[in-house]
Image (cartoon, rainbow, N blue to C red):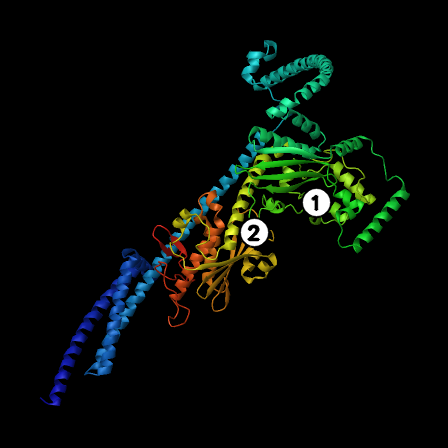
Amino acid sequence: MGRGDDEGEVGGRDAKRRRKTDGEGAKKSAGGAEGESRIAVKDKTLGDTFQASLEHEAGEAHSRTEEEDQRLAATIITHVRATMKEILKLKQDRAEQWSSEVEERRTQVLMLMLSLRRLSRVQKVRVRDARERTAEARQGVDGVTLQLQNLLYEVAHLKKEVRRCLDFQSADQEIDLVPVEQFYVEAPDDISRPTETQENLHEQRLARLQWELVQRRDQTQLFDKLTEEKEAVAEAISEQERKLASLAPRINTILEATLPLQIALDLPIDAKREQQRIVQLLPSPLYTLWVQVSAYGEAFDSNIKVEVFGDIEAARKLITKEEEPRTDTYSDSDNDQDQQEENLSRKKRSRKVQKMDADELDDGVRLTLSLHPLSVKVTVDTKEGNSVQVSFNYMQVLRIITAKCSVHLQESPKAALTDVISGDTLLSCLFPEDDGKTSPNPANFFQLNYNHINLTDHLPTTGRPYKWAQYLAGLSFSSYQQSSMSEDSQEQATGSPSASAPPAGDGDVVSWQESAEQVPVTIQAIRRRLQARLALHTQLLNLETANSTNSIDIPGELLRHHFPGKVCSEFKSWRPITWADYEASPATQHFREARLVTPQHLFFLAVLERKQVVLEAQVAVAPDYPSTVPVVALALRWEGLNHADDIPQLRQMEKEVNVHWDELVSCRSDRLQLLPLLLYRLAVCLDVFTEASSAHSDPETPGSHFHKEKIFFRPARGPDRAFPFKYHPKLGVFSQR
């Protein structure tokens, strides 16, 4: 067949297709006309075409679900994509009659887009209905909420009125009357009137008040009678006291005769009697301390010994001088002026002298820092035979208690570079923030400033005014008496302190209950402190002589329970450092800024090595160790000096030692070994640090590879590349926290 035949055949097919299309179009046109006629009829029936379309869309929105429309839209989009691909292919291939085919498919795409538009309108109808339903529900909730608020306001108002009625107080309500049952049993019928008062509460209240008045009159008469009897008994007692006083010389003669027997039987009756005479001369705070500590020792602790020492004659003269009427030494204005000039000249001379002995102090300073002639010495013995002696003194002008401590051991300890069992520092910070360097009496600040006295310079002579010492003596400065303040103001106005010491207890607020509560706590704290310092002294001696990790003295059970069997890092040295050295190190900055370390701490430098890696640990031991855990600051010397701020893993190592220390101790005996345990853990962490670091380093780099001795599954984990510092004793492996 030729080309013309082909074109004819194609033309014939096109003609047939056009006729078919025209037929179908005619049918569609006929159907469309019929549909339009039906819509017109419907519009005429409903009356509004727009309203009909809205109802139609609403009907479609209610007849189908959103999921069905989504699937239908996805199907239409798929058909559109397929049709567009066919159009693209027809335009690329340009087959016969391609333009008509393209036009036909374009029409199909437009119809599909109309379907998508119809689905979009249906979806908007759904959204509109949902918003309307939400608004209706919200209005209902707002109405209920408003009703609830109104009801709550009414309830609060009613409660307020009820509370006001219940809280109403009248004068008779303060009287504690007898119960109603007891009133009807005890009161006579002419007062109680049961038939009238049992039903009428007001009359009942009046009858009970009348019965209370009768009872009080009877009790007043009884009081007067008992007072007369008391006076008669007092006269009889006075007569008996006169008779007993005549027996005192005879009893003294008998005691002198029995003195050899007392010595033989170790019965210090005379010594106790002498102590009883001396304690009467003590000032009120020292007397309170002596009574409370002696009572506690006799009742619960036989290892406590309390004695009174000092110049008895001076104490008696002091009491005699206090009992005499005080003369006004500042009445003459000329004498006042002379005294002020003399004090001024003394101050000028004191500025020229930089160092002064106690004997060269002027009278004002010496009198301000004067101590009472008597002191109370408390000796606390331990089960091991060691003892702590604390001597308590009373400063008469400053009116505070000071304490001096000395330690007596059964065996002489070896000398260490840092003396931690010295009596001067043993009781420092026995309780938090109580180093005994400042006076707890607020009035002393003005007294000391006026006389240009720095109390810290005189602590070796006067002793330390610890807060717990004031509590033991029952002193409370929160309610300082007006008499004390008036005398202090008089001293400052005249230019010199009072010429004579105040009477015993004058101006002091003594609380026996606080003193009794503080005694057992303080005694236990002193024993614990001595035990902890002796353990720390032993540990420091061991660390000063240790030259390897294995030489750190730790009980074998703790080693097996908390650490692996082999440690490669070596403990090289241990030496004390000063606060200036500690403060100058950048590694300790974050601890100092957080106030975790103060100058009262003991500072040491520990050095650990593994090959060319050197770890420097600056250890700050608190005065109340082991109650407060030592603080360890780390610096690493490996390819330069690095601190915790430079290497996150070094900060993790600090955290492992400073934060997770509680995993190493389970009781107080274990906690006494906390310092060597932390240093041993530091050596283990250095092993893990070097081995985990070598896992990421280049094996060919000299000095960067360490043989893996510890078992861990991942050398680093997380965004901060945490190393496996946590040890699992049961499994024998390390892991990240």
Residue 492 percent across, percent down from the top left: 79, 44
**What residue is shown at x 65% (from left), y 39% (from top)?**
391
**What residue is shown at x 63% (from left), y 37% (from top)?**
471
User: From the image, which quarter does the C terminus lie in?
Assistant: bottom left
* Circle 2: residue type: Ala
Distance, label 1 to label 2, CA atoms, is: 26 Å
> Mark 2 = which residue?
416
- Asked whether 491 or 31 is in front, the reply is 491
- Determine crowd level at label 2: few under 14, some 14-19, many 20+ residues with C-alpha closer than 10 A: few
* Circle 1: residue type: Thr
User: From the image, which quarter does the N terminus lie in?
Assistant: bottom left
Above or below: residue 105 compared with residue 614 = below
Tell me where residue 667 sits by quadrant: top left
Q: Is residue 660 left or right of residue 251?
A: left
Q: In the image, which is nearer the foreground, mark 1 or mark 2?
A: 2
Whether residue 311 appears in this view of the structure is: yes
Residue 583, label in figure: none
Residue 536 percent across, percent down from the top left: 53, 48
Tell me where residue 232 sits by quadrant: top right
Asked whether the beta carbons under mark 1 and mark 2 sit within 8 Å of each other, the answer is no
Q: Is residue 513 left or right of residue 634?
A: right
Which sits earlier in the primary sequence, circle 1 or circle 2? 2
Q: Is residue 10 left or right of residue 387?
A: left
Whether residue 722 appears in this view of the structure is: no
Residue 395 percent across, percent down from the top left: 72, 40
Identify the element where label 2 is drawn: loop
Q: Report the number of numbered marks.
A: 2
> Mark 1 = which residue?
461
Q: Residue furthest top?
A: 189
- Asked whether 145 or 549 is in front, the reply is 549
- Determine crowd level at label 1: few under 14, some 14-19, many 20+ residues with C-alpha closer than 10 A: few
